[in-house]
Amino acid sequence: MKCNLWPAILAAVCLCWQAMPMHAQATPGAGETLAGTGGVGGVLKDPSGAVIAGAKVELGSSVSEFSKSLRTDPQGLFVFDSLPAGHYRLTVTASGFASAMIRDLVVRAGSVETANLTLKVEPMREYVEVDDQSAGSIAATSRQVDATEQGASRNIAEMVAEAPGVSLRANGQLASIPMLHGLGDERTKTVVDGMTIANSCPNHMNPPLSYVAPAQALQVTVIAGITPVSLGGDSLGGTVSIESRLPVFAEPGGHLHEEGSSTGFYRSNGDNFGGSLTEWVASSNLGIGYTGYWTTNDDYTDGAGHKVTSTYAQSTDHTMTLAAQGAGNLVVLQVSLHHTPYEGFVGARMDMVRNYAESLNLRYRRGIGAGTLDAHVFWQDTFHSMNIGHDKSTFPMPMSMPMNTHGKDLGYTLRYELPFSARHILRIGNELHRFVLDDTWPAVPGMAPMMGPNTFVDINDGRRIRLGTYLEVVSKWTPQWSTLLGVRNDTIWTNAGAVQGYSSMYSMDANAFNAANRAHTDPDIDVTAVARYEPSASGKYEFGCARKSRAPNLYERYAWSTNWMASGMIGWFDDGNYYVGNLGLKPEVANTVSGTADWRGHASRAWELKATPYLTYVEDYIDVNTLATTMYGMSTFAQLQFANHNARLYGGDLSGNVVLWQSDGAGRGTLSGVAGWVHGSRLDTGSGLYQMMPLNARLALEEERKDFTAGVGAQAVDRKSRLDPNRFEQATPGYALFDVHAGFRRGFLQANASVENLFNRDCDLPLGGVNLDDFMASMQMNQIKPLTGRGRSVLLNVTANF
């Protein structure tokens, strides 16, 4: 089914920068505050605009045992006054409504902060995340994930893809690669509970999101495009942040706080099943918790009934959490083990035959004066192995080629936030990330000189050390105008030791590499400036610009061999091409202008529409130059060397939702949608940039009535015709897919069912790469084809909360 969707979203060039949400001035009717203290006040309403009286409002300190609670008055008003300046957590609960939480509410001396909330009519056990009052922007998406979504998601990347500006590039079954405004992989910063993890694989089979299980993710934050310097660094496309739940302690002098859940799921296409278990027990000062997750799947079938080989996977995750609080301190220690015994990759010549990682993540938070210190120290040790998986072993010419990598991540982050006046917040921070990589390919007996008699050393003691420092000021000038200004420096040092090939046939490249200067120092400077204008509760506008930088990764610089077989083992693009590094690569520098307009309904806030146009010019964009081409069967492949070129990307995001009906009898019906379009060009040739997502849109119609939910969804993707000729990128036709789902909750049990790709449509994935398995399995090696998506699949999952 073809859908010729005309790119109707035109990119507007606005002088725009993502503004951080600021607090309004004193709430009408709020009480006076004492000198040196502040307050919080607001009005609680339901979606129709009616006030909610008698709701419980709790205010607790983010770093101490401070806690207060009250009930809203007949006008829905609540006020906390005479509060010491600092960070607080506000939680609201009311009978017949979903709870709501503001995780980090900043109280400044001499002012009363506004925290108006609208509760969702849904008597279910979940939190709805509202706008962060001190960080983020209206262009960002930050939301909490419930057990239903955790059970329905194959991996964390699918949760990230719900945000505007995000598309997914296929990369195995455990962690697709999020592309933010056409920039993904290591051009996007990914942070998991404060940790920054590098890829320990020449094909990026173990991206950072593969180390966190869906059951562990509570909050997903996506900033596509302009990113505050405090949340960015060494990246161009934006930031993806995944956070697990903060520790919840018992009330002082009360009983132990205990909670947990267990989920089981089954997806018919690919025989995918698994489950999770979470448990948390805490006193008023100490807590301990566990999260376990396991999943396995076989190869899936596409809409034409064709089995897509090398799409199998299995993975297990275990995380133990220890936490303590007292005297204004919060300490959280996470110990995690990740094991993937196997995972197939249909677009690569190799498969993952083992990936094992162990990590420690220590967080410390406390109030210092009027500000807050937040610190993380983390370490991860990863052992990764590739070889020919069991699907590829059935090819006409089966073989073995073991490849082993060992990656070590060590780092810390320090952040201090200080409200130094009623108008201004200062953020200063320092980060270190040290990554060390060894990539060796053991000799294969009987295969000299091509694969023996020596061990092939691809990366020897490769080191990439990043030290970053930033300063950021958030200012509230008037009730309508606020700004964010930030500057950041990241210095990146890279180096690698001497290498060798399997035999003397590799000596020319190895000797040239070993004789070259391999040490590089890249000083990267980032600058962000954002202005936000909020004339009324029904409209918000942001305008801003940013300069962002990223230094090359280890493989872009140090993959040294021009041998066809060796270079064919390098590349994280699933396209069958061959890649060679370049010691002369320079850092990428992106200059972006963007803006966001957010319109909402009046008192009831029954609808919202948000639009974000953007334009990015990238100096020294890391693309490729063609060294040579070769024919296999009816297809041409290229040997490519990473090289700097200038590029331009522009496009826009559109998202919105509207309440269609709401009553006691009919329940609540909502319609929501997301659309995006990006156009990327290499400026010296005018050709398309690689793996740009065409115009695409998603719509969802949801019905909620008491304990029952149901809905239908649709996804439409335009044909992909603007291609990168250097990599022989495949064109794909447009398509439309539909799904249906239903869920029921009663007491502590929740059950959900859905049908994905309801009409079993066959579709070529625009960012899926190619099906290299089918190509290599054919003796005639017919024309290579794009990877096809999953056909119809039934999903069932059940969750028990206890």
Image: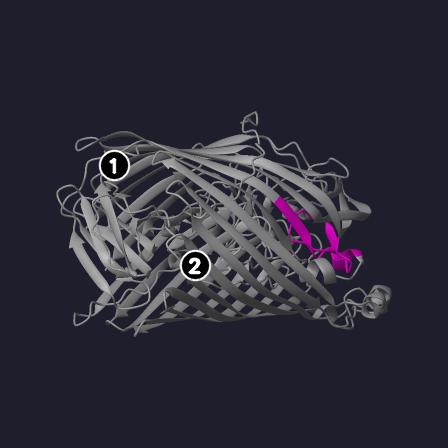
Instruction: Name the residue nearer the viewer: 202 or 107.
Output: 107
Between marks 1 and 2 in the image, the one whose residue lies nearer the viewer: 1
Instruction: Name the residue nearer the viewer: 185 or 82.
Output: 82
Instruction: Name the residue nearer the viewer: 4 or 583.
Output: 583
Against 25, is 350 above or below? below
Residue 559's image quarter?
A: bottom right
Instruction: Name the residue nearer the viewer: 165 or 646.
Output: 646
Query: Mark 1 is on which residue type?
Result: Pro
Q: Is residue 413 left or right of residue 142?
A: right
The residue where tag 2 is placed is 213
- Range of magenta residues: 564-591
Count of number-bearing discs: 2
In the picture, the disc for residue 628 is none
Q: CA distance from mark 1 to mark 2?
A: 33 Å
Residue 512's image quarter?
A: bottom right
Residue 533 location, x and y as percent?
Answer: 43, 39
Callout 1 secondary element: loop
Q: Is residue 452 left or right of residue 22?
A: right
Q: Main secondary structure of the magenta part?
A: loop
Residue 800 location, x and y as percent?
Answer: 26, 56
Decide whether residue 752 is among the magenta residues: no
Residue displayed at 48% across by 55% down = 473
The residue where tag 1 is placed is 47
Identity of the residue furthest to the front in this view: 35
